[in-house]
Amino acid sequence: MDTTHGLPPAVLDLSDPAGRSIHTLFGQSVVGMVHLRTDGTIVLANQAFADMLRTTADELAGTSLVALAAEEDVQRERTTMLRMIDGVLPHHAAEFVLERRDGGTVALQFGISALLDVDGTCTSLVCQVMDVSRLRRAEDFMSRRALFDPLTQLINRTLLIDLLGDQLRVRQNPFAVIAINLDRFKAVNDSLGQSTGDGVLVEIAGRLRQALQPGDAAARIAGDDFVLLCGNITSRAQVDALTQRVLDGIAEPIDVDGLRIQLTASAGISLVAPGTGQSGDEVLTQATQALKHAKERGRARWKVYDQEMRTASTDRLRIETSLRTALDEGLMRVAYQPLRDLRTGEITGAEALLRWHDPFLGPIDPPDFLPVAEETGMIVPLGQFAMSQAVRAVATWRDLTGLPLCVSVNLSPHELNRHGITERVSDALDVARLPSTALRFEITEGVLVHADQQVRRNITDLHALGIAIGIDDFGTGYASMSYLKTLPLDFVKIDRSFVAGIDSSREDQAIVRATLELAHALNLTTIAEGIESDRQLDLLTELGCDWGQGYLIGEPSTSTAMLERVSG
Ligand code: C2E
Ligand code: CA
Ligand code: CA
């Protein structure tokens, strides 16, 4: 490597015509080219290379390229470069960030070739150089986009899972994963518009960041789902205090777009002890399961994942096993809950609700077994069972009372996705000699949001058959009113959580009022579910809600009980 003394060795013999043309090529090449001594001093650079550094070829000659390069790049490449200079390695590609004459930096890709003399000693290096700055910037941008949430600049789910994995491997002390979801953020989005909703999310992200200690992380993993990763947890009390602080912070009024908004949030916590062999995904699932429990117990609270929830997931396994035989063994029933026309006070029909009483597990609620049924495909025979029972029941009621009663059946996403549903339904009506108005279908908002061609066609066909189709639990999912226009729908059912708050919360009342107005403007009938008190019933009637359902009007019961009710 002893080339620091004396003249640089000649690269090209300019007296030789080949040498001259190569020299010309060097000068005229649009690709950056630079000839270096083995210590990194520039012997000759072409203008294309000089342009990359915002300087001239003359100014570069004799200066050290190494001095311009980022220290970490020089360190990284040192050993490889020594191997080139030792004549061991003839070619090498490397990337260096160099300082430009104007003080900026540029990322350059070097294709380096060692020039060897006859005895194999490396005399100098020739490099072809490409500016890859733009590419790197684009890559940085992409990887930022791939790992960060563009709206809030918090890390996204991918990076969170990565970080969690790292923490699980290296951490010696316990840490906490806190899943946070805003309570009814959708109502904000729907009523105030998405840009205001975005403003709220950005503000919340800022508050979460502030609540963190150095080394902790905050992520937004979906819509209004946030996750905190908090290390150095020494006690349960500390986690409780932290979570309370975070939830209190979120509940502070938010000023956005000239509006003052107040929201609450719920949280679920997974406390992680190191060395349990859990994966990042598992830990996150535990936190979200705990969050679900917190939500089910009302808003603005939190819950730590515990033994009870672990048991619940084992129960799930038992449910899955028992579900397979329940239908065959006649353990499934359908209950009917009356629907009332709020204007006339008449009972107009009933909603069909599945009931399962297992001799060992006891009564199992639909929310506990339906998700399992969906996942295992059992929902198809279950749905067929519910529908055939419901059709038989409504035929009996109509025959025996002469009243134009209807039955409303819940359709799962799975069922709506299947071919031939319209034919099966139409056959069932024919066999029972029922008009299509005797049957109604309730589908969830989620179905609407994710509706593909098949689902849309099925909904359109069923509607064309004359069957009323409506959206269940309206206001809880992610569909906005605009979705209602995209499909031929007939009614919306206002979710019982809004009905529950209608007599106590101004916000709930405003939501119900707005939903009723919009639905009516779209020519949709409105049904309020979960009416439990006279006051709720009166308010809904006053607000112009068309139909009602709830324990106050009647609890789900047998087909015979329904018949007695309408006959009497
Ligand atoms: P959903 O369609 O919203 O049904 C109404 C639920 O609210 C029923 O719970 C009913 O028992 C309950 N409910 C009725 N009145 C009141 C009230 O005044 N207060 C309160 N707090 N609750 C009331 P259930 O039977 O547990 O059903 C839960 C969900 O399971 C249903 O929600 C529906 O989405 C689904 N489901 C039930 N049967 C079927 C079915 O045959 N097929 C499908 N795909 N889903 C079903
Ligand atoms: Ca329903
Ligand atoms: Ca409902």
Image (spheres, rainbow, N blue to C red):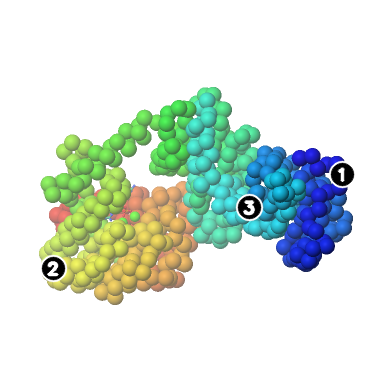
- Eyeballing the image, is 519 above or below 257? below
Of callouts 2 and 3, the N-terminal one: 3
Q: Residues within 10 Å of mark 2 (few under 14, many from 20)?
A: some
Of callouts 2 and 1, the N-terminal one: 1
Q: Quadrant of the C terminus?
A: bottom left
Mark 3 vs mark 1, foreground winner is 1
Give coordinates of residue 548: x percent, y percent: 33, 58
Q: Residue at x 58, y 39 (%)?
A: 217
Q: Which mark is residue 140?
A: 3
Q: Which residue is mark 2?
A: 432
Q: Which residue is mark 1?
A: 6
Q: Residue at x 14, y 62 (%)?
A: 392
Q: Which mark is residue 404?
A: none
Q: Is mark 1 within 8 Å of ligand 1?
A: no
Give coordinates of residue 215: x percent, y percent: 61, 34
Three-letter amino acid code at the position of disc 3? Asp
Three-letter amino acid code at the position of disc 2? Ala
Residue 66 relative to residue 243: left or right: right
Give coordinates of residue 269: x percent, y percent: 47, 35
Helix, strand or loop at mark 1: loop
